[in-house]
Image: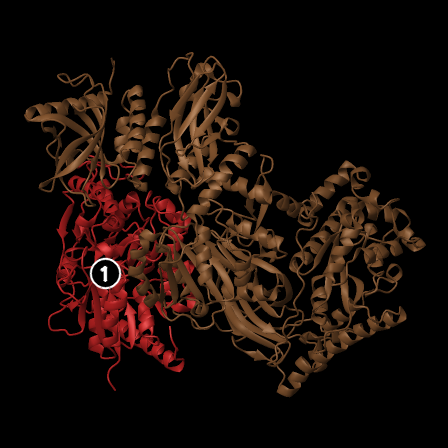
């Protein structure tokens, strides 16, 4: 009958047999046993028993005998000699009156006739894990395995139908899967008769099922396939099958030509009325030759996690599932399962540790899954931030099995770290999205921060900065900070979407991921398509109203971008916030073998739901929109400058040994619009000779350092070489909340930062918000700025003055007057002149400390004069604008358009005068700019752009490259506040570009107005403008560099603009 | 006015098991008691693995450490509950129940942590929580907060010296621990140590490593350990024509460089015994037959705590050098003058940085020049050619050359001995510390801290 048997099994069986023979009275032997559930035991061995069951039996257990029902499957065993033909047994033993505990078990006793004792005398000796047991079964002959699967399916149907134990179902299912997957490719020869097998029936919901099996036609083609429900409902499935390869039954000789001919299939089944019975299903197959085959289906698997695992396992066999398969098979099943698995849940308990804050501003929600040890590490960091005393901190425990552990330590953690928090204990695992939603529903504050347990702040103060930004930003949806890996590289700086190779699929990408945190591009707070939910701030009510995170995705993925896209859809904008940094030790939780399948499904679902929206979002011409500046509050406490923090922070300990700052003193409040700095530095291997003050990445004052006389006493070390410095820095033009970094210049040529001064200041002007403010066109020449100014001037709310003839720069002029004369080095000249040339009053020299004996005189110079000067300069600009508006009879106009250079300080002083000024950064493909400049110069305007000042065309291109770099720096510095406009967009779709600009200026953007502006501007171009134009048609001017520039110049352009062009959206 | 109290917290008591930091602490405790500037209280952690004693009481972790001294306590913590990576007790009741009871009753005016091994860093935070305005001082002994490799800053896989810790580098040393865990380790330890008002470092080298690691320079200062005065007579120096007697004092561990020392002796005595471990390389200026006449005495203990591979290598080397090496074993400090008298040179062959080894101070106290590696705290304490000799740390051949030079150069020993100046005394140290404590207390009084 059987030729070979697994050697291992045979050997073990022989040993068992020997043991049995050695103990007379045993009529059989059990080699292995494993628990299938609390009261069902699976055994493998040999004994005499009728096929099927139940057979009466008993089990010695704790001194008494428990009744047992036994079902058996028989197979041949050639190692058992003096027994019947099929002595091998796989049997299922149900302990009828057994409840719970497991203890030492005695022998099994068969009672279908005279009692027969089955060895070993202690069954506990052969208990193994289910996994081992399954492995053991896979060593049996293939046809025995097949029989075993059938037996297990059958026995589940008949014997255990009353037991609706999910654990049992799951174990049986897994056991069958283990055996089935181990089966070698079938050697069943193709025969004339049709075949049909149903492997699995999955109950996804009460009326939704999935059927998985295989079939093969006989002599005639299969004509119909019908599922018959336990209540007799007939469902045609022939036309909803999704085929899949089944090499085990197809065999290598039968590889089908098309996938439709694969033997394997799966389909969804919907019944008209809810159905809770697990068994009784059958499938009927008819063929052309009128043969009919009916096969029973195994009982339905109901446990949702087991069902999900089965479906995902199935998905993992296909690398490129078709959209139709995803849409019509996986989506209905998995979405229904997610609903079942993530049904809303009430916490079983909520425990408050410590005194919760009254009227908290922010609720921080941290879902916990698995790694509850991270709570201690988070609290250790939150504990050093006083803000967390006022935070509504909520942990949501989504691992119910860890509840005891968390309860045991939570009180102690409060005691040690002093941070009050709540823990919501969930009765079952509900997944990332639902856990967050439950936590959010408990939040008491109007702002929410969703925060993962593996996120740790870099330093205190981040949360209030985020909250402040959130509150001051109109139309904000979600706000995400910068997240870092443990090596200071970027984990998250906002998210965008990337097209995958497979059509229609998009994946989430993180900007600048893996780059160092100092990467300039990541230093800009800006709008982004989406932010991560690992640390996401959102208005509580908004979160609730859009429905929170959706649990349609499997195991924590895409919930965040889904939320952000819904916010986007509802008219909100998502922001990346560069001014708060946290570490995110990504991937510390959630290991899962089925992650790849889940990820594939999630990606498909997300793309399916949002593909169109993402496409539009990523292809929008200006997807980085500017943020309108919110006028800063004018500090009303009187101090012109307040120092909040002074920190010695040496960026390079190899270069610098020590430093000291005597001035400014933290907490100092100053009536002067300047800042005195004084201190010393000590280089490690060489002297320092100069110090620079840097704000917003821009050095704005440089002063010398001198050796100090007489080294101060060290603590026993060698005498120090110290270099002292002192200077005063004008604060006019600095941001209202400023960070000034001091940087030493050492003799060996290195630059190293050594101190940071953080403070606040007030503006120098005290005038009301002006009626009319400037719109600055910041650009570099030949970018169509004249066209833009002319177009804008056609709007009734905008004025300008003779732009093509004169290029007024009124605001720039007065801004520089203010900047120059508010420098202490200038106004101190009125007391003691240090230079004797004609420009002495400008004070272009060192800027000493403002050390004037009488404080009222000092205040007059440093505060009174400076503020009067500020008001005066503003007044003169206002007056000019007013005069122009009167002249042009546009007294209601709100904006004056003028050009502005990208110079940092001109713009800084200008925004000091007009905090609500608008800025349009106008760019054009710089290669076309070069062409246009050459053409303009050739028309007789030699020297207009300085071509005559350089030796070669290459050098000229390099100079324009530098100017473009400055323009980029200017744009970055106010990114989010200034509007980026591309010449090409203005030319190609002027309507859209104008709508954008007018929207930015807060003006009406109806098509009528825009049409009129375009008409007026297009009407008879003035001769002077025509003179200005160097390309016969404006549209032809786009991309002209490809023709106009030779290879040499194109190479020069590549070198000059390669880095800059992509930043402005050019390829 | 009652005398102000200073609480010393340390990880072990010398009466349980000798060790450098704990001995220093007890010496300091006694000196402070003598000086009368502060009333010292000692809290010494006890429990396995250092002590064999088991906790015997319910409701307290305390017991008395020294008969007749009401101010010396044991504080029992369980090693099974100790998390070695983060250096914290998983049983948080140690911090929230038992330690507060002690601290609130004793009410010290200042707390000086000498070592927090087996106690956990949480104890610092809890001290700050319970005594918001009490200054906290923390003495750094080795690199434990920085380095998980027993605080040695030596790479696990190559025994190379390590210069700085990053999550990635630490993960390289311990591939089973993720870089993220090491990142959390550093943040966790720093969060607790942030409550310390002043760190003391007995070596400038160590100080710089901690500044690199993130302790603000203004919060750390150099403070040498004091040497207690001689308990009996100073070791005499009998006139000998040849100064060829070498002493090693310290733990019998790999990091203390015993392997290097024995290997060097083996090279000097090559030919007299079969080869061990590796064949001699590099400088071999002693040919068989021209044996150098020298002898080494090894004083120390704790070999049983060392990894088996080291124990085996050690015994192989001992076997090979048995004619030139005598293992004295564990010794009582009171016998030190006699032991010192027996030797001419003290050798400190450590392969890790060392901090401020007590043995160097003791050698100087007894007028013995020191031969040590040229790195870290050793090199800082011994001036090459003035009161001792340096060799290339970790190099057996360099040590062999140096020993040979030391033993065979006439007049060298006398010159180096004359170069030894008296070590920093415990009385001086105690009075310096009293000054530091006073300064911290005065600063606190001027700027009271509201809470935590």
| Closer to us: B362 or A122 | A122
Relative side of A487 to A915, left or right: left
Q: Pointer 1 indicates a residue of which chain?
A: B
Relative side of A621 to A308, left or right: right
Q: Looking at this rendering, what residue extends furthest in the front direction? A: A232
Give the image location of residue B356, x and y in percent: 29, 60
Give the image location of residue A494, x and y in percent: 56, 52
Relative side of A617 to A143, left or right: right
From the rendered image, report the letter of the chain displayed in brown: A
| Closer to us: A551 or A876 | A551
User: How many numbered badges does the structure rendering display?
Assistant: 1
Give the image location of residue A183, x and y in percent: 35, 23
Question: Does any portion of residue B279 appear in the rendered image?
Answer: no
- Per the image, label 1 sits on a secondary structure element best described as helix
| Closer to us: A264 or B354 | A264
Quarter of the image with the C terminus of chain B is bottom left
Give the image location of residue A752, x and y in percent: 54, 60
In this rendering, the answer to whether A140 lies above or below A371 is above
- Report which quarter residue B126 is drawn in: bottom left
In this rendering, the answer to whether A584 lies above or below A636 is above
Quarter of the image with the N terminus of chain B is bottom left
Colouring used for the render: by chain
Which residue in the structure is indicated by mark 1?
B20
Name the colour assigned to chain B in the rendering: red
**Residue occupying the point 54% across, 42% down:** A605
In this rendering, the answer to whether B195 lies above or below A997 is below
In this rendering, the answer to whether A137 lies above or below A124 is above
Crowd tier of the residue under label 1, counting other residues whose Cα lies within 10 Å: few below 14, some 14–19, many 20 or above: some
Question: Does any portion of residue B372 appear in the rendered image?
Answer: yes
């Amino acid at each position: 009958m059987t030729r070979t048997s697994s050697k291992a099994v045979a050997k073990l069986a022989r040993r068992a047999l020997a043991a049995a023979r050695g103990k007379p009275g045993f009529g059989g032997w059990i080699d292995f046993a494993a628990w299938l559930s609390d009261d069902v035991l699976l055994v493998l061995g040999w004994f005499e028993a009728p096929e099927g069951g139940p057979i009466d039996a008993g089990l010695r257990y704790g001194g008494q005998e428990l009744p047992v029902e036994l079902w058996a499957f028989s197979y041949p065993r050639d190692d058992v000699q003096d027994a019947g033909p099929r002595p091998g047994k796989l049997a299922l033993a149900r302990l009828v009156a057994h409840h719970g505990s497991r203890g030492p078990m005695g022998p099994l006793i068969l009672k279908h006739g005279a009692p027969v004792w089955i060895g070993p005398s202690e069954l506990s000796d052969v208990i193994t894990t289910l996994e081992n047991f399954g492995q053991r079964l896979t060593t049996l002959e293939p046809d025995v395995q097949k029989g075993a699967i059938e037996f297990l399916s059958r026995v589940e149907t008949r014997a255990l139908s009353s037991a609706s134990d999910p654990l049992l179902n799951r174990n049986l299912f897994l056991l069958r899967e283990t055996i089935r997957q181990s089966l070698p490719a079938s050697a069943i020869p193709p025969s004339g008769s049709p075949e049909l097998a149903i492997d699995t029936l999955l109950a996804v919901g009460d009326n939704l099922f999935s059927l998985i099996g295989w079939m093969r036609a006989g002599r005639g083609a299969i004509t119909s396939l019908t599922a018959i429900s336990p209540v007799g409902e007939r469902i045609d499935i022939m036309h909803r099958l999704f085929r899949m390869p089944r090499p085990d039954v197809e065999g290598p000789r039968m590889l089908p030509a098309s996938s439709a001919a694969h033997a394997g299939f799966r389909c969804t089944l919907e019944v008209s009325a809810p159905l809770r019975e697990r068994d009784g299903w059958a499938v009927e197959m008819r063929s052309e030759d009128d043969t009919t085959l009916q096969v029973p289906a195994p009982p339905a698997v109901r446990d949702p996690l087991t069902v999900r695992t089965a479906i995902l396992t199935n998905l993992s066999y296909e690398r490129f599932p078709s959209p139709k398969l995803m849409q019509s098979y996986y989506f209905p099943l998995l979405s229904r399962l997610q609903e079942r698995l993530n049904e809303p849940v009430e916490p079983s308990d909520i425990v408050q540790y410590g005194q919760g804050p009254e009227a908290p501003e922010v609720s921080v929600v941290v879902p916990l899954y698995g790694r509850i040890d991270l709570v201690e590490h988070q609290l250790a960091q939150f504990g050093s931030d006083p803000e967390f005393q006022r935070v509504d901190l909520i942990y949501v425990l989504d691992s119910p099995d860890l509840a005891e552990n968390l309860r045991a330590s939570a009180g102690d953690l409060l005691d040690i770290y002093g941070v009050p928090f709540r823990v919501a204990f969930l009765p079952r695992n509900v997944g990332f999205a639902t856990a967050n939603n439950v936590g959010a529903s408990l939040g008491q504050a109007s702002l929410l921060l969703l925060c993962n347990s593996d996120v740790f702040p870099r330093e205190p103060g981040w949360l209030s900065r985020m909250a402040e930004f959130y509150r001051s930003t109109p139309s904000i949806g979600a706000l995400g900070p910068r997240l870092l890996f443990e090596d200071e590289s970027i984990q998250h700086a906002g998210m965008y979407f990337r097209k995958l190779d497979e059509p229609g699929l998009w994946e989430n990408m993180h900007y600048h991921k893996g780059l160092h945190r100092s990467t300039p591009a990541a230093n800009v707070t800006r709008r982004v398509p989406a932010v991560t939910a690992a640390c996401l701030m959102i208005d509580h009510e908004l979160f609730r109203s859009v429905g929170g995170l959706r649990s349609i995705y499997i195991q924590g993925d895409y919930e965040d971008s889904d939320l952000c896209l819904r916010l986007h859809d509802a008219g909100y904008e998502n922001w990346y916030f560069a001014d708060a940094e946290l570490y995110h030790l990504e991937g510390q939780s959630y290991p899962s073998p089925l992650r790849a399948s889940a990820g594939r499904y999630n990606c498909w679902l997300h793309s399916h739901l949002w593909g169109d929206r993402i496409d539009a979002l990523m292809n929008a011409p200006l997807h980085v929109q500017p943020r309108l500046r919110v006028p800063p509050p004018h500090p009303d406490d009187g101090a012109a400058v307040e120092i909040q923090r002074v920190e010695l922070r040496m960026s390079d300990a190899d270069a610098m040994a020590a430093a000291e700052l005597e001035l400014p003193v933290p907490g100092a409040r100053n009536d002067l619009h300047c800042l005195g700095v004084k201190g010393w530095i000590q280089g490690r291997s060489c002297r320092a000779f100069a110090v620079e003050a840097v704000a917003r990445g821009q050095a704005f004052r440089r002063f010398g350092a001198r050796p100090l006389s007489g080294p101060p006493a060290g603590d026993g070390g060698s005498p120090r070489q110290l270099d002292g410095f002192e200077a005063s820095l004008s604060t006019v033009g600095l941001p209202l909340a400023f960070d000034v970094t001091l940087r030493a210049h050492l003799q060996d040529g290195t630059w190293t930062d050594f101190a940071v001064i953080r403070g606040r200041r007030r503006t120098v002007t005290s005038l009301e918000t002006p009626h009319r403010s400037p719109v600055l066109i910041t650009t570099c020449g030949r970018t169509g700025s004249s066209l833009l100014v002319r177009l804008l001037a056609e709007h009734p709310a905008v004025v300008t003055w003779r732009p093509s003839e004169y290029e007024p720069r009124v605001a720039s002029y007065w801004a520089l007057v203010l900047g120059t004369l508010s420098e202490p080095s200038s106004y101190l000249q009125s007391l003691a002149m240090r230079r004797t040339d004609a420009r002495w009053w400008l004070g272009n020299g060192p800027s000493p400390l403002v050390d004037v004996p009488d404080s009222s005189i000092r205040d007059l110079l440093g505060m009174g004069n400076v503020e009067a000067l500020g008001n005066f300069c503003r007044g003169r600009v206002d007056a000019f604008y007013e005069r122009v508006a009167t002249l042009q009879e546009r007294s209601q106009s709100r904006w004056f358009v003028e050009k502005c250079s990208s110079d940092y300080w001109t713009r800084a002083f200008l925004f000091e005068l007009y905090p609500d000024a608008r800025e349009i950064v106008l760019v054009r493909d710089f290669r076309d700019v070069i062409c246009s400049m050459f053409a303009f110069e050739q028309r007789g305007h030699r020297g207009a752009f300085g071509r005559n000042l350089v030796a070669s065309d290459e050098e000229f291109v390099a100079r324009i490259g530098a100017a473009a770099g400055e323009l980029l720096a200017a744009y970055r510095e106010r990114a989010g506040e200034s509007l980026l406009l591309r010449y090409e967009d203005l030319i190609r779709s002027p309507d859209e570009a104008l709508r954008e600009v007018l929207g930015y200026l807060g003006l009406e953007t109806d098509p009528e107005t825009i049409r009129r502006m375009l008409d007026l501007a297009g009407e008879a171009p003035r001769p002077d403008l025509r003179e200005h134009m160097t390309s016969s048609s404006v549209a032809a001017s786009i991309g002209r560099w490809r023709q106009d520039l030779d290879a040499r110049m194109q190479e020069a352009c590549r070198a000059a603009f390669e880095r800059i062009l992509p930043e402005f959206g050019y390829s | 006015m009652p005398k102000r109290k200073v609480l010393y917290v340390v990880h072990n008591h010398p009466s349980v098991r000798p060790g450098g930091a704990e001995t220093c602490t007890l010496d300091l405790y006694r000196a402070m008691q003598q000086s009368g500037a502060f009333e010292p209280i000692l809290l010494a952690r006890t429990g396995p693995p250092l002590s064999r004693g088991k906790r015997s009481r319910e409701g307290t972790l305390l017991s008395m450490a020294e008969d007749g001294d009401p101010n010396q306590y044991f504080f029992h913590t369980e090693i099974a509950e100790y998390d070695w990576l983060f250096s914290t007790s998983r049983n948080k009741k140690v911090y929230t129940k038992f330690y507060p009871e002690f601290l609130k009753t004793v009410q010290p005016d200042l707390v000086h942590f000498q070592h927090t091994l087996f106690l956990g860093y949480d104890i610092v935070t809890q001290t700050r929580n319970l005594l918001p305005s009490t200054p906290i001082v923390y003495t750094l002994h080795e690199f434990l907060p920085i380095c998980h490799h027993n605080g040695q800053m030596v790479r696990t896989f190559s025994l190379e010296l390590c210069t700085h810790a990053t999550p990635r580098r630490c993960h390289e040393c311990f591939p089973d621990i993720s870089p993220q865990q090491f990142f959390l380790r550093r943040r966790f330890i720093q969060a607790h140590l942030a409550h310390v008002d002043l760190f003391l470092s007995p070596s400038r080298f160590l100080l710089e490593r901690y500044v690199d690691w993130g302790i603000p320079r203004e919060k750390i200062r150099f403070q040498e350990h004091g040497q207690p005065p001689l308990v009996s007579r100073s070791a005499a120096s009998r006139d000998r024509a040849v100064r060829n007697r070498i002493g090693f004092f310290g733990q019998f561990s790999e990091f203390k460089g015993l392997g290097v020392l024995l290997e060097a002796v083996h090279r000097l005595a090559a030919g007299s015994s079969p080869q061990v471990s590796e064949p001699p390389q590099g400088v071999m200026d002693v040919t068989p037959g021209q044996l150098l006449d020298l002898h080494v005495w090894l004083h120390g203990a704790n070999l049983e705590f060392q990894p088996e591979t080291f124990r085996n290598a050690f015994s192989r080397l001992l076997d090979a050098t048995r004619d030139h090496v005598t293992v004295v074993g564990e010794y009582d400090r009171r016998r030190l003058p006699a032991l010192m008298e027996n030797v001419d040179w003290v050798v400190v062959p450590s392969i890790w940085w060392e901090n401020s080894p007590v043995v160097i101070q003791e050698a100087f106290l007894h007028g013995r020049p020191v031969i040590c590696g040229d790195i870290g705290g050793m090199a800082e304490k011994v001036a090459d050619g003035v009161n001792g000799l340096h060799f290339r740390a970790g190099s057996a051949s360099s040590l062999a050359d140096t020993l040979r030079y030391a033993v065979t150069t006439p007049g060298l020993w006398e010159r180096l001995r004359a170069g030894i100046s008296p070590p920093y005394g415990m009385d001086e140290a105690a009075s310096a510390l009293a000054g530091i404590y006073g300064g911290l207390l005065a600063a606190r009084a001027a700027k009271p801290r509201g809470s935590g």
